[in-house]
Image (spheres, rainbow, N blue to C red):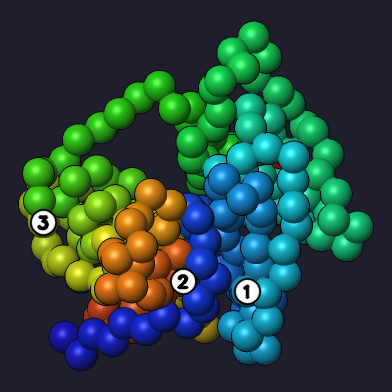
Amino acid sequence: MSSIKIECVLRENCRCGESPVWEEASNSLLFVDIPAEKVCRWDSLSKRVQQVTVDAPVSSVALRQGGGYVATVGTKFCALNWEDQSAVTLATVDKDKKNNRFNDGKVDPAGRYFAANRRSIYKLEKEEQIPDGMCIDAEGKLWVACYNGGRVIRLDPETGKRLQTVKLPVVKTTSCCFGGKDYSEMYVTCARDGMDPEVLLQQPEAGGIFKITGLGVKGIPPYPYAG
């Protein structure tokens, strides 16, 4: 296996970065900052970041088959128009539950956009704290970002066996995805909300976007929403 390299490619200071998605057509990484109510797009070539601000916490973003993007905003599925910075509601759920919101979302191979709310909590091993965002590599193995664990782990979904652990220089790792020219790079989002000033001094890159290379495995392109 080649040597693993970890670097912070964007010091965005996200309060809670999540939902990284690679857009091959533009060589860009999409991600959200949930409490800041922002969808961001980082151009890996120009290193520029563009943002769209929405009207509620935004928990996930996905590509759209016909072009553009979709996102889960509050309890709404929205279509994003990057050109005029607008978000058009496609559907709304749980209108009677004002304190609820989507927590994450993914598109399946059939092009359907699934989203989960905040009513389910899962627990992993103590040292790895809470399993958060995840992705699948080309060999069918699962990569999981461990919130408050400062790492991403590779698991065999059939046996549950842990195959690999990659530690990062920040604790609140939130999600991961593969990207880059041949999907051999992994991008990891993280958070900084709730961290004491002393801890932030020790982890100045908290809230940034990290790139991991040399994993020895490639990912697969993200599925676009078919609607």
Which residue matches tag 2? Answer: 209
Q: In which quadrant is the N terminus drawn?
A: bottom left
Lower position in the chain sequence, tag 3 or tag 2: 3
CB within 8 Å, label 1 to label 2: yes
Res 80 visible? yes
Location of residue 79 in the rendering, given as x and y in whole percent from the top left corner: 77, 44
Q: Nearer the viewer, residue 189 or 180?
A: 189
Q: Nearer the viewer, mark 3 or mark 2?
A: 2
Based on the displayed image, in which of its 4 quarters is residue 167 positioned?
A: bottom left
Residue type of the residue flagged with mark 3: Arg
- In the image, taking residue 171 as reference, residue 40 lies left or right, namely right
Q: Residues within 10 Å of mark 2 (few under 14, many from 20)?
A: many
- Residue placed at 65% from the left, 63% from the top? 40
Res 141 visible? no
* SS for dot 2: strand
- In the image, taking residue 40 as reference, residue 78 lies left or right, namely right
Location of residue 205 in the rendering, given as x and y in whole percent from the top left corner: 40, 74
